[in-house]
Image (cartoon, rainbow, N blue to C red):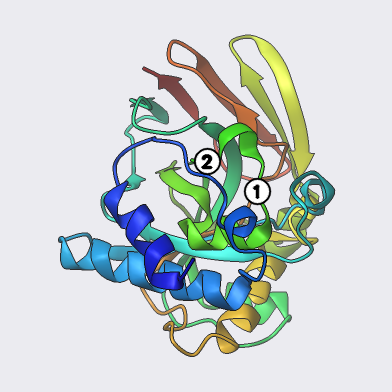
Amino acid sequence: MTVETFAQELIDGLGGAAPLATFTSRNPLFDLGQAYAVAQRVHAARVARGERPVGRKIGFTNRAMWDEYGVREPIWGCVYDTTLFRPRGGHASLAIGHLAEPRIEPEIVLHFKAPPPATRDEAAILDCIDWIAHGFEIVHSRFPGWKFQGADTVAAGGLHGVLIVGEQVPVAAIPDCAAKLRSFRIALRRGDKIEAEGTGANVLDSPLLALASLVELLAGLPQFPPVTAGEVVTTGTLTAALLVKPGETWSTKLTGLELPGLTVTFR
């Protein structure tokens, strides 16, 4: 099975939730290099049909998930104008019938006013960011039961479905922002019940360091452009990624960071 074959399967299935057998099960030699080649072809097809890339999602920044999904490093995919939503008032209503086995991931979203440098200096990264938001990434897997290898995930665009971005807060309005991004805590609720909790340190020690990992990753993938001004980057799930269903309402509360929580009702 070739890169072109797998890419065409994904292109043919854009907008649908039909299950796929994993690429790694059909080709044991399918690796990350081939996976990014598939992702590049799918991305080109999306752009050709009119979708506009507006940023990136970083996946597998939460090391607690590595054993569960058989990965050992972060990955990334594109966010598009068709998959980015900015609800008013901190409450979103989202249809998810087109997504396969969707899961919710509470994340920190960064918006860049300048291209970030290749550095792990959090202050230098922060200097390139104009606003920060809390968001939900809704990920989905056409590989049944969420059983896959890292290369399958990369080929499928990092499993990106939808990015919901909450209130945008200027970096200047968050004192000691770098320190707070490491230490803040978040609670994720379904209805009135807390289903998961997390902290900024869960994503490669800080959302800013998760971004640093993306810059390093892109440096080794010259076929893709680096992060530039105007892009949003969502930095990975702060808690476990949990299955969601129509009719459910999920919400978050953050402590130790001046960002409001977010609520989404699925339909």
* Residue closer to the observer: 42 or 249: 42
- Residue drawn at 61 percent across, 69 percent down: 30
Q: Could you tell whether 43 is left or right of 207 in the image?
A: left
Counting from the top left corner in percent of width and height, residue 15 is at: 29, 42
Question: What numbered label is drawn on residue 103?
Answer: none
Q: Earlier in the sequence, mark 2 or mark 1?
A: 2
Task: Quickly name the residue at label 1.
Answer: 148
| Viewer can see residue 36 | yes
Crowd band around label 1 with a 10 angstrom C-alpha radius: few (<14), some (14–19), many (20+): many
Q: Measure how far apart labels 2 and 1 are at the Cα level.
A: 9 Å
Query: Badges 2 and 1: C-beta atoms under 8 Å apart?
Result: yes
> Looking at the image, which residue is at 22% across and 59% down?
51
Q: Which mark is residue 141?
A: 2
Number of the front mark, 2 or 1: 1
Q: Which residue is at the front of the view, 183 or 174? A: 183
Circle 2 SS class: loop
Q: Position of residue 242 (x, y in %)?
A: 64, 29
The residue drawn where x is 60% and y is 63% is 27
Q: Is residue 105 left or right of residue 8?
A: right
Identify the image quadrant of residue 103. top right
The crowding category of the residue bearing disc 2, from other C-alpha atoms within 10 Å (few below 14, some 14 to 19, many at least 20), is many
Q: Please tell me whether residue 86 is drawn above or below residue 8 in the rendered image.
A: above
Amino acid at dot 1: Phe
For label 1, the SS is: loop
Please give the name of the residue rendered at 42% of the width and 20% of the height, measured from the top-left corner: 266
- Three-letter code, disc 2: Ser
